[in-house]
Image: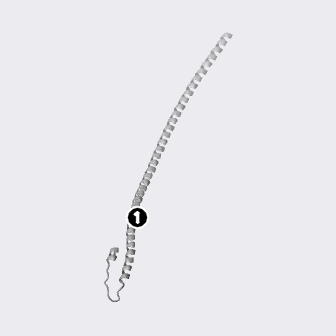
Amino acid sequence: MITPLDIENKTFKKQAVNGYSTQEVHEFMAELLRDYERIYRENIEYKDKIAVLNQGIQHYKSIEDTLQNALVVAQGTAETVKQNARVEADNILRDAELSARKSVDEIGQKVLEKQLKLEETQKQFDVYKAKMEALLISQLELLKDMNRDKED
């Protein structure tokens, strides 16, 4: 690439016949040099800006990659938490069902014991009632006998 210094140092051979006006050539070269220097500087500035912007893009791509990785980790963690919660809920339900069955079995056993005790108490009451009836009948017979003895 031609640099502004190359343009400034460029010289042309002079011809005696049909040559160019050296002043016009110098003026044109000076104008060309100014424009070329400006464009050359702008080009360098743009290249620097492009390099800075590319660094920014790389920085943001790095952040994007980090965020994507963090998102993947967060999704994995969320799935793990949900799965652990499901397992824990299942364990709680199973423990509650076992506890409920145990309570039902214990209550059923107590009801059975109470029913047996009630039946035993009813039998004892029936025996006691029968003895009392027998006693009362014998006492009544005794009173009748005593009344008959008095009448005789």
Which secondary structure, mark 1? helix
- Point 53% across, 29% down: residue: 117
In the image, is 66 to the left or to the right of 137? left
Q: Which residue is mark 1?
A: 53
The residue nearer to you, when weighing 29 against 92, is 29
Q: Is residue 3 visible?
A: no
In the image, is 88 to the left or to the right of 9? right
Farthest residue toward the front?
A: 23
In the image, is 2 to the left or to the right of 121? left
- Point 43% across, 53% down: residue: 74
Disc 1 marks a residue whose amino acid type is: Leu
- Quarter holding the C terminus is top right
- Does residue 98 lie above or below 55 as drawn? above
In which quadrant of the rendered view does residue 56 lie? Answer: bottom left
The residue nearer to you, when weighing 10 against 66, is 10
Residue 57: % across, % down: 40, 63
**Neighbour class for label 1 at 10 Å: few (<14), some, many (≥20)?**
few
Residue 135: % across, % down: 60, 19
In which quadrant of the rendered view does residue 126 lie? Answer: top right
- Does residue 140 lie above or below 12 as drawn? above
- Point 38% across, 70% down: residue: 41
Residue 114: % across, % down: 53, 31
- Does residue 37 lie above or below 61 as drawn? below
- Does residue 144 lie above or below 121 as drawn? above
Q: How many marks?
A: 1
